[in-house]
Amino acid sequence: MSAGAPPLSGPPRPQAKGLNCPKCGAAIVLRSFGQAQTVVCASCRCILDAKDPNLAILQQFEAITRDVKPLIPLGTRGKLRGTDYEVVGFQRRSTKVDGITYYWHEYVLFNPYKGIRYLSEYNGHWNDISICKQLPMSEGTSANYLGEIYKHFQTCDASTDFVLGEFPWQVRVGEHAAVTDFVHPPRVLSSEKLDKEVSWSIGEYMYGREICDAFKLPGDPPEAMGVYENQPSPITINVAGIWVTFAAFAVFLLALMAAFDMRAKKEPVLQQTYQFNRADAKSETSFVSDEFVLGGGTSTVEVKTSAPVDNHWIYLNYALINQDTGQAWDFGREVSYYHGYDNDGSWSEGKRTDSVVIPSVPAGHYYLRIEPEADPSLPRIAYTVDVIRDVPVFGIYGIAFVALLLPALVISWRAYTFERSRWSESDHPPMQLSSMSSSSEDDE
Amino acid sequence: MFRKFYLLYGLLTLSTVAYGQYRGWSLDTVNQLKNVPKSVRDNPGSYRTVYAGYHHYTGGK
């Protein structure tokens, strides 16, 4: 136990055992007592047999890994999920995939009453790992542990590059193990096969800040890069549930549309046909319609204009005027229709009818002021004006539909991109990525 | 949390639609004027529309 550190919880006060390295003579401190199978000399990095009273040298240190420094120094104590632990061992491991070497770090934690557990760190992603209490059931691409199904993520060959401190197994630098990970975020179930021995462990994702707080490490934790295999998704909600809610809203919206459509009076209050004569256009062209009554309450008013235009236009300046209050709704509408033939075949643009819906028109006596204009090449044309009270506006339902759809789409997209990032690093990448990689392999 | 927000948001959207339909909302924009003189009925030329002088489409392909 390092000097000055607070004692671990519990009545007995464990004492570290002091020994010396048989190679360099440096003091060796055994923190985990009988739990350690091997201990690494902090000075010369020789791997020593912790079970041997003379600390027999098991493996000489390889100088190439001398500069690896653990983020949590050995001997550091902290409270992890309510239990005091001391960091007694550290190893760096690596795997090579497609010519790229990926490194991660593993820490051995020890509590004299709770035993050993581990922390792993890869690119700022941490996992709190313990040995499985039951043997998981592995079935092809999934595994079942304590009733929870874990999906196969990847299998790789992990090699041990660097070791420091104490280990509850016969650790060696250069040792290779087949590691298989199954995930069920935030947990990861790992099997490690070394020779004929298979060991299973269960890990739970932890954030760097939690680790720093637990071990009171100075500064900020290394920033987590990318999405880790068992990192919990920031989209904590059930995406399918959101779509069910959306479907319910859509059905309700349809019901609302049907109800308001049935309720709408669609009452024609004026239908008149007028004639535009260019000969008269030199004088004042504006005129007013017959008076009409808009009954009921405040409602929409549709003004429809139809004219038999043929490669021409007609434009009508309208004002719907309330005779009683002097309130007016001023708007201009064009009816134009063009058609013809060109190299692409026949074409047409515009329509012979136009419609506008005036919002929130109160009941009262009204008339239309109409001021027509027309294509200069058009000598005369007849046009019909229809005024209909209380018509439904379906565009509002369209906007509402999009407004309801948008949050569901955004959430689904965020969840999808997160999972896509996660699985792109696995042995089962998303379809596009796998097809892309296979096509690039074909190119080679 | 989001689900609650979405429920509230959806109900608010549907309520707005229902209120809008009840009040006769429309997506078309028209210019609203007040106190148009009663004389327009007898002299339509005395009213000047804001839409006069609109540039008309004369095209086709």
Image (spheres, rainbow, N blue to C red):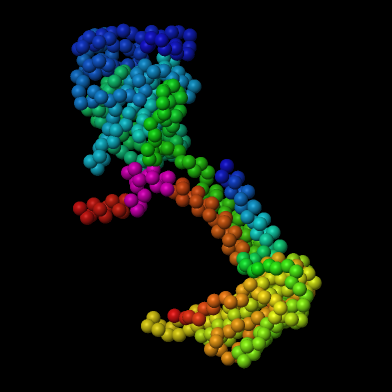
Residue drawn at x 27%, y 35% is A95
Left-right relation of A2 to A174? right
> From this viewpoint, is residue B19 visible?
yes
> From this viewpoint, is residue A391 visible?
no
Residue drawn at x 26%, y 36% is A101
- Could you tell me residue A423's position as x and y percent? 37, 44
Above or below A239: residue A135: above
- Could you tell me residue A173's position as x and y percent? 23, 25
- Could you tell me residue A255's position as x and y percent? 65, 62
Q: Is residue A425 magenta?
A: yes
| Part of the protein shown in magenta | A417-433
- Could you tell me residue A5's position as x and y percent? 42, 12
Q: Nearer the viewer, residue A26 or A184?
A: A26
Give residue A316's quadrant in the image: bottom right
Give residue A32's quadrant in the image: top left
Q: Is residue A201 magenta?
A: no
Q: Main secondary structure of the magenta part?
A: helix
Above or below A416: residue A274: below
Above or below B2: residue A43: above
Give residue A66's quadrant in the image: top left
Residue drawn at x 46%, y 36% is A147
Q: Nearer the viewer, residue A72 or A280?
A: A280
